[in-house]
Image: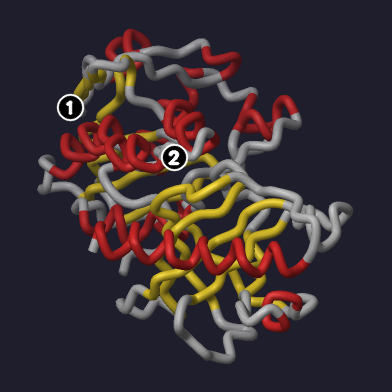
Amino acid sequence: MISLISPSEVKNPTSIAIGSFDGLHAGHRKLIDSVVKENEYTPTIASFWPHPREILYKETRLRLDLPEEKLPILEELGIQQLVLIPFDKKLSKLSAEKFIKDILINQLQAKSISVGSNFRFGFKRSGDIDTIKLLTKDMDIKLKIISILEDNEGRISSSRIRDLLQKSDLKNAFKILKRPYSFTGKVVKGKGIGKSLGFPTANLEIDGRKFLPGEGVYAAWTTINSSPNKIPSIMNLGSQPTIDPLLPSAVEVHLINQDINLYGLHLSVEPIRKIRSQIKFQNINQLSHQITQDRENALKILNYLN
């Protein structure tokens, strides 16, 4: 598997595209395909880390894919290296011209550069595709301008996928992503309330930089420690209004018809369809009855999709 590397570790010369590539959606894949076609050079994706807006504006930028999650997907697409360019205040002040010369040409030794038609870069986003054309016109560098991909709903973008996930519209998010949305977390100890109800749940510790779908109860597939076997599950994402409305939002997963000690293991969860929103029940018995119904609904959904 390819690994995350710094600019100093790059295998060069490169065929390269630069961007966040968050979600690796259909539009990104079009750009990646143009990189891979230049196979006489090392097919490379370069991304800034952390996101520039985190440094410049102190914004929290939740990611559809964390860098390590991108690796197996990029490898399948033919990319040989993912370069993380450390973004800081100093780099933010680099002019568009120096960015091309110092980063793309000198450091990454780009021989083929693929960019989207709306690509902007450099200090205050002063550079665009015309800047790249001007700076590379007398060099032995191929420049590919890739048009923005659209469908019947408009431009395909990471923001659109986030909006769909926030609305729990996993079906349409899947269409744009061209793959299931998923996330991974380590199982940590909870209060054991689910087990006392006959529905043991795994409490997941999720990387705080990961974007999660809207709150609710979902039918989901779960895999354990990267196993290929998918286990039908119920996922609860959000607070626990019946148990304790003051508890923070959490991710809990009940693996249907399984009795496994999961503490310390890593679970990958693939939510498939939202079953219901969260409800505050009058008592624990009502909650237990609802979870029984949730389990039946989840199995119907997953069996249908399987």
Residue on which the image places disc 1: 142
Tell which circle, 2 or 1, labels the residue nearer the N-terminal end.
Answer: 2
Rendering coords of residue 247 (x, y %): 84, 57
Rendering coords of residue 240 (x, y %): 76, 57
In the image, which is nearer the foreground, mark 2 or mark 1?
A: 2
Q: Nearer the viewer, residue 22 or 271?
A: 271
Residue at disc 1, secondary structure: strand
Residue on which the image places disc 2: 22
C-alpha separation, residue under disc 2 versus residue under disc 1: 25 Å
Residue at 75% from the left image edge and 80% from the top image edge: 192
Q: Nearer the viewer, residue 66 or 274?
A: 274
Extreme right residue here?
246
Residue at 17% from the left image edge and 27% from the top image edge: 142
Q: Do the numbered discs 2 and 1 sit on residues whose CB atoms are within 8 Å?
A: no
Residue at disc 2, secondary structure: loop
The image's colouring method is: secondary structure
Which quadrant holds residue 220?
bottom left
Task: Note whether residue 163 is visible.
Answer: yes
Task: Note whether residue 4 is visible.
Answer: no
Which quadrant holds residue 147?
top left
Position of 90 with respect to 138 (left or right) is right
Is residue 188 shown above or below 29?
Answer: below
Is residue 227 shown above or below 34?
Answer: below
Rendering coords of residue 189 (x, y %): 74, 79
Residue at 22% from the left image edge and 22% from the top image edge: 146
* Quadrant housing the N terminus: bottom left
Residue at 64% from the left image edge and 29% from the top image edge: 53
Going by the numbered disc 2, the residue's amino acid type is: Asp
Going by the numbered disc 1, the residue's amino acid type is: Lys
Q: Nearer the viewer, residue 164 or 134?
A: 164
Mark 2, Cα crowd under 10 Å, few <14 / some 14-19 / many 20+, is some
Position of 72 with respect to 111 (left or right) is right
